[in-house]
Image (spheres, helix red, strand yellow):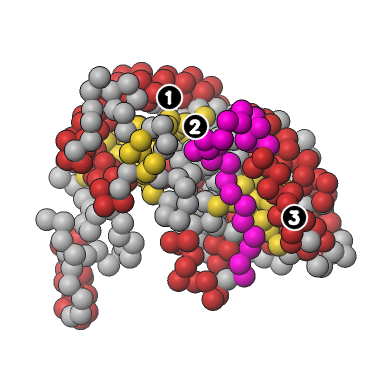
Amino acid sequence: ALTAGGPGDGAASLAAAHESPMSLERPISNLFYQTRLRRPTLARGEGVYLWDSEGKRYLDGSSGAMVSNIGHSNPAVLDAMRRQMELSTFGYRLHFENEPAERLATRIAGRMPEGLDRVFFVSGGSEAVESALKLARQYAVARGQAERWKVISRFPSYHGSTLGALAVTGMSLMSAPFAPMLREMPKIPAPTCYLDRDGLSLEERGLRYALMLREEILRQGPETCLAFIMEPVGGASTGALVAPDGYYAAIRAICDEFGLLLICDEVMSGAGRTGRYLASEHWNLRPDIVALSKGFGAGYAPLGAMVADRTIAETVIDHGGFVHGHTYAGNPLACAAGLAVLEEIDRLGLIEAAERQGAVLKARLEGLMAHFPFIGDVRGKGLLLAFELVADRETMAPLPPALNAHLRLVDIAYDAGLIIYSRRTRGGRVGDHFMVCPPLIVTDAQIDEIMAQLTSALESFAIEAKLPAGG
Ligand code: PMP
């Protein structure tokens, strides 16, 4: 049933689409095919579960793409959205302030480190990152430092699909076709200490990676460097990569030494997923600008935010204002959803739950290593968790690419009704890795269910790929 539609015959396809869009082999609303050529049609969601139009149930073990942090169809959020819809769904920002936006901004500022209290709403993660890069640049220009424009980032990393965010994204598969259109930005290696076999302690390795930032700034010329952007806990590109503790303070000190702004991309790690509102809080790391999305709107509305240090934002405003904006940004409906999401996170204690249930799930994933020698690493914080498959745990050599482990294991689990999220970072050192990131409302019984389905998927994959299991 999973066959690709043939090319050509656009008129006939469109005519068919008008009758019944979903009867087409290839849906016209989806240009992106990675794992499956034809996916089931989503019918409804509730809590940690989703159902397709055939009535099959799926446990959303990755919260979509680490989005649905409070679960699906939360009644309080739906009520708040309905109430807002009756009042207004849109008022243009040049014509009106709107109450949901101002209330959400106030609530969000209250969650940020001291002084980070200027909020710019957007409709997604790429827009949040794009806004952060542009605000940083305008701040430098406003301060008479127009020669600063280079934003250093890490490889691998993912910061978004728009051209600016893509320029700082370290993922050659995503950026290669657009290379001539991009202003290439300097990259340093992500702190993949778990892959290093050098006799150093973890902390020493972490510091070595942080010092690569210093070396890169010196190589580029500090006066040309504007900012450093990183995910405090990695997302899909590195599979929930956590650096050794000392890395974070060292990065902050290096940014300060050379006057770079520190942008934390918390699009995936923020909004409570790691057991703190911001993942940077685990290390008392104070960013200058933060990008939020995903769990911030939690799948209820397209919503994101850039939160900036007051001085940065006020300086830019005093020099004529931020020359950037998106029409739908900060609309009252999305902000009312975001506000209700935040209230549910507090009412249900979901940040604490992320820490507690994350510890339970991580220990269970680590337990799988005894049975499956091809699991090389389990990592993450709170409920931002991942495991990596390898050919050899000692050397961390990756599985042969021909096995397509990152696609096959996901498909086997999917067929059995468990959704997880995977990547293989080509060109980087990180191999096939799998995000296991259920909504923060996940119960102990649902963790049991995830583990039972995952274990049986790994067993099937081991047989198919002729890998050893058991022990
Ligand atoms: N930054 C990070 C860390 C992300 O994980 C993502 C999405 N995977 C983005 C930015 C881009 O967000 P969006 O897809 O909403 O544009």
Instruction: Name the residue at 49% across, 32% down.
Output: 380
- CA gap, disc 3 and disc 2: 28 Å
Instruction: Name the residue at 41% across, 32% down.
Output: 394
- Where does residue 273 sit, x and y in percent of width and height? 51, 33
Disc 2 residue lies near ligand 1 with CB under 8 A: no
Q: From this viewpoint, which residue is outermost toward the left?
A: 1
Residue under label 1, please give it: 362
Magenta-drawn stretch contains 185? yes
Q: Is residue 416 visible?
A: no
Of 78 and 127, nearer the camera is: 127
Magenta-drawn stretch contains 59? no
Residue under label 2, please give it: 380
Neighbour class for label 2 at 10 Å: few (<14), some, many (≥20)? many
Query: What secondary structure is marked by label 3?
Result: helix
Instruction: Name the residue at 82% across, 51% down.
Output: 258
Of 2 and 212, nearer the camera is: 212
Q: Is residue 270 left or right of residue 254?
A: left
Q: Which residues are magenta?
A: 183-207
Neighbour class for label 1 at 10 Å: few (<14), some, many (≥20)? many
Q: Nearer the viewer, mark 1 or mark 3?
A: 3
- Where does residue 115 sit, x and y in percent of width and height? 79, 40
Query: What secondary structure is marked by label 2?
Result: strand
Q: How many marks?
A: 3
Neighbour class for label 3 at 10 Å: few (<14), some, many (≥20)? many
Residue under label 3, please give it: 217
